[in-house]
Image (spheres, rainbow, N blue to C red):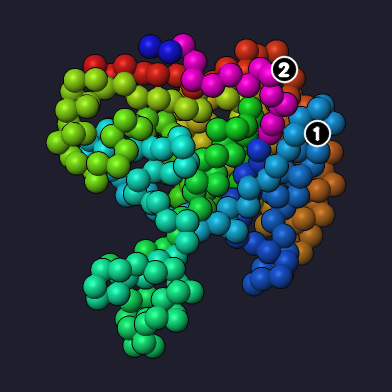
């Protein structure tokens, strides 16, 4: 059994921020998310400490919902560390199938199919296979030393985009590579689990923090803490930054200014950026763990 899967000691420290809001100033909301503004402040402090920084905007990505293979058998979830995909979602572009079963990119299908064939396929559950961008997230999280989740409470729960992405992290936390490409052979999964049962917690040892903006109290961070620690990740000291407003302005017009000028919120946010780099610098920077379930 390997003690660690990845060694980042000779690499620059990298902090990845994940923005989970759909709001945009050029779309319906007419305003960028407050949580993303705080995330940028946090990452800027991490940059001052010498870290490389990057933001993943989940709203810019097309990420399919987890198909929950793991619940049938743990080894039924497979992950390729070569192309950063789980084998439920392997398309890097939208694909249409014609009646002969031939597949074409959407651009090519438009040229070779009749109008009726094209739209019949596009509107079919079986003949349209959408691209999936989770490979982008997988790659960046594996390269990262630290992860900052920028969230908000949505009807007393976590944001839909964040939940969708988190459910797909199952492939990093246990996805089997040895069975990749066997067409989801269930018997092979049963045999692997019974006879070998070695799974990789690929995010094990990485540091994380949370920024949460809310009017409803923080109903996101507790469960997010559970999910991340279950995968072996470490929450840094003072690892949660809060931006809190209240329903005293029914138009919400002053929310952003109140939060972004709150000295308490700004201090928590900036300290999170500093602390995550400090913790990483004093760690082994070795990540990932093999777990023997047999």
Residue 146: x and y in percent read 64, 30
How dense is the environment of label 1, judged by Cα within 10 Å: few (below 14), some, or many (20 and up)?
Answer: some
Task: Identify the image quadrant of residue 86.
Answer: top left
Residue 237: x and y in percent read 67, 21
Say left or right for 3 vs 235. left
Say left or right for 244 vs 178. right
How dense is the environment of label 2, judged by Cα within 10 Å: few (below 14), some, or many (20 and up)?
Answer: some
Q: Which residues are magenta?
A: 3-15
> In the depicted view, which residue is nearer to us: 152 or 49?
49
Residue 287: x and y in percent read 54, 21
Which residue is at 39% across, 81% downward? 112
Say left or right for 70 vs 289. left
Answer whether residue 4 is magenta in the image.
Answer: yes
Answer whether residue 7 is magenta in the image.
Answer: yes
> In the depicted view, which residue is nearer to us: 154 or 173?
173
What whole-number distance in Å separates the C-alpha atoms at marks 2 and 1? 13 Å
Residue 182: x and y in percent read 25, 41
Which residue is at 62% across, 32% downward? 144
Per the rendering, the mark at residue 281 is: 2
Residue most extreme to the left: 187
Circle 2: element type: helix
> In the depicted view, which residue is nearer to us: 107 or 129?
107
């Amino acid at each position: 059994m390997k003690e660690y899967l990845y060694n980042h000691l000779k690499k620059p420290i990298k902090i990845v921020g994940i923005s989970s809001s759909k709001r945009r100033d050029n779309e319906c909301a007419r305003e960028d998310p407050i949580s993303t503004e705080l995330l940028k402040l946090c990452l800027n402090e991490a940059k001052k400490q010498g870290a490389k920084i990057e933001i993943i905007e989940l709203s810019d990505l097309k990420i399919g919902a987890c198909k929950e293979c793991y619940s049938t058998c743990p080894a039924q979830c497979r992950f390729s560390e070569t192309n950063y995909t789980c084998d439920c979602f392997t398309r890097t572009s939208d694909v249409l199938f014609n009646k002969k079963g031939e597949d074409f990119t959407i651009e090519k299908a438009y040229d070779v199919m009749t109008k009726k064939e094209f739209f019949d396929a596009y509107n079919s559950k079986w003949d349209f296979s959408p691209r999936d961008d989770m490979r982008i997230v997988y790659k960046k999280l594996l390269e990262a030393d630290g992860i900052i989740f920028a969230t908000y409470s949505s009807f007393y729960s976590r944001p839909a985009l964040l939940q969708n992405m988190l459910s797909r992290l199952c492939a990093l936390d246990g996805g089997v590579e040895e069975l990749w490409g066997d067409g989801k052979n269930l018997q092979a999964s049963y045999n692997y689990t019974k006879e070998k049962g070695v799974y990789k917690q690929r995010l094990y040892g990485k540091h994380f923090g949370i920024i949460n903006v809310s009017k409803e109290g923080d109903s996101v961070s507790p469960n997010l803490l559970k999910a991340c620690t279950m995968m072996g990740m470490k929450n840094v000291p003072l690892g949660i930054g809060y931006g809190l407003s209240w329903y005293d302005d029914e138009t919400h017009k002053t929310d952003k200014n109140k939060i972004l000028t709150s000295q308490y919120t700004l201090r928590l946010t900036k300290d999170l950026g500093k602390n995550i780099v400090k913790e990483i610098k004093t760690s082994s920077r070795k990540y990932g763990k093999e777990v023997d379930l047999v």
